[in-house]
Amino acid sequence: MFQSFDSPIDPTVGPARCAALRQELARRGLDGFIVPRADAHQGEYVPPSDARLQWLTGFAGSAGVAVVLDEDAAIFVDGRYTIQVREQVDTDVFKPMHLVETPVSKWLREILKPGMRVGFDPMLHTVNGAGRLKAACTEAGAELVALGDNPLDAVWEGRPKPPTGQVAIHPRALAGEAAGDKIARIAGEVTGAKADAVILTQPDSIAWLFNIRGSDVQHTPLPLSFALVPGAGRPRIFIDARKLSGTTRDHLGEFADIEEPDALLPALAALGGEGAVVLLDPDWTAVALAEAVTDAGGRVVHGPDPVILPKAIKNATEISGARAAHLRDGVAFCRFLAWFDQATLDGDLDEIAVAEQLEAFRMKTGRLRDISFDTISAAGPNAAIPHYRVDRQSNRVLPADSLFLIDSGGQYDDGTTDITRTIAVGSVGDEQRRHFTLVLKGHIAIATARFPVGTSGAQLDALARVALWRSGLDFDHGTGHGVGSYLSVHEGPQRISKAGHVALEAGMIVSNEPGYYRDGSHGIRIENLELVTAAEHIEGGERAMLGFEALTLAPIDRRCLMPEMLTREETAWLDTYHARVLARIGPHLSGEDLAWLEAATRPVRG
């Protein structure tokens, strides 16, 4: 099994660990310290050795930050985690705060007193993030102090060692482009930015650029590393040599110099000493790296990581791989759904048993490298926690006459999948069916959208919410995130959300996952992955348009619907989608599985 159900959470750890950190801060003459979830790469995925926020507080979500002062402490999370944080953290020690409504900088302005000294680790905060923190401290008359070492690490007993997961070559037959050609493209971007080199800090950018995949973090094939790519000359990749086999070292050595990670700061200082201009993304680059250049006399220029956009726009090979991965995954998922319906009739099921069975169906494909994230297997009120993670303590038997939510995905060497379905267990009440149908209407609105070239995800996001808004409802997460090609299941820069300001382009993959969550009762989410495509010409139209192709192939549970709430066009979309699922998946099934799929994909009013 790729997923462990042992609980990593212990809400009782907060008091003692917070006290130990405060003692260390006092010893250093500090009045506070800021603990982000990020590691030095500033990404979503961190290894256990860098899970400082979880160690300190017990919180296991994918985004957050804690601030520990001598008399106050708070933990800041977004709307996805407002329920989860109260279950995982001792709130008598860490006061939960909404990261959007009360950003850390705002809280610091209000609570700091003149003369206070607040420490931070400059390897764990981005250039822009550190700038906001410094401005807040200055406004309060306090001082933000960059530390040479992390005081939390000094009190973290039994800290895990950094990972040394093996790196593998991602062959051109799957990547669709040689690493040397990619490097030449990025070198051109560096020159175009009037820089001498770019710092790459995101491991998925490095994986894509050098056609490698790693195994340093759970469920995502990332090689934790840094890189410097010059406008002219050989790139340098900073990676632990223990991760490289002879074959992988030879592959990288064809077009890059290989160095240890602790050589990065000296390399940046050397560039600064030469007066070099270094391009960096201020939203993804640790402030310590920027200052290594500027303190030595160099100059930095700010711009987006030049790898992010080409990585997001999948080439023909990657698109073909995504379709193949989704067909394979869809067959496994439909077999699972057929099993699920029978198993709920035969006896009691619990959340762990369901997650294990789904993983087993994916394993039977013979191509599964890993799951793409811990499966969200959520029964009844647990589904009201958008990022619920089942463990042996929280495991719940699926109650009769309820909704069950399962959000899962697979990592295949030709593509990454992510699908959510909300499924009826027995009879579903009218209120839950109404909520389900409102969510489905939002999903269909995104799936059928036609939009001009240059449209951003923020401009589309409201389409997923209008039906909910008309009923006085909403959801507190984005409608969609980007997805990588055998890489991160959460990939930028594209997303469909209120903050998704990057224009969508043909070849990008985004999720379409509106939801609704009623605390203590139920949760609903319907998710397909969508490929952005050039839409068919609209008669009389004047502008180039884009649209979506649903990559995900699995039925949407009609038993949860109120059909009378759907328009004729919405009903036609659902019937057409189900006909496509049957046509694509049906030939790969037989017997009871095929009979189940034929029944599950019947027309809504058929």
Image (cartoon, rainbow, N blue to C red):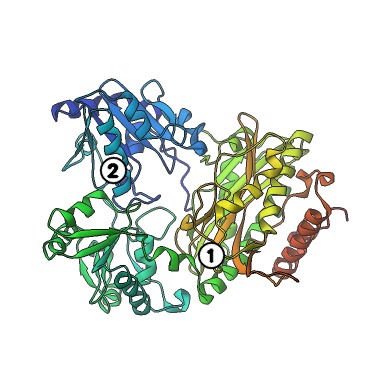
What percent of the width, then of the height, locates residue 432? 73, 36
Relative horizontal placement of residue 40, taking residue 371 as reference (left or right): left
The answer, for residue 344, to whether it is visible in the render is: no
The residue mark sitting in front, 2 or 1, is 2
Local secondary structure at mark 2: helix
**Mark 2 nearby-residue class (10 Å; few <14, some 14–19, many ≥20):** many
Quarter holding residue 108: top left
Three-letter code for the amino acid on which mark 1 is drawn: Met
Mark drawn on residue 258: none
Residue at 34%, 71% in the rendered image: 189
Quarter holding residue 139: top left
**Mark 1 nearby-residue class (10 Å; few <14, some 14–19, many ≥20):** many
Residue at 27%, 28% in the rendered image: 140
- Residue farthest along the right direction in this orientation: 606
Relative horizontal placement of residue 353, taking residue 160 as reference (left or right): right
Image position of 408 with respect to 467: above or below = below
Quadrant where the C terminus sits is bottom right
Relative horizontal placement of residue 410, taking residue 303 as reference (left or right): right
Mark drawn on residue 508: 1
What percent of the width, then of the height, locates residue 344? 71, 43
Local secondary structure at mark 1: loop
Residue to which mark 2 is pinned: 130
The answer, for residue 187, to whether it is visible in the render is: yes
Residue at 54%, 69% in the rendered image: 507
User: Observer-nearest residue: 496 or 259?
Assistant: 496
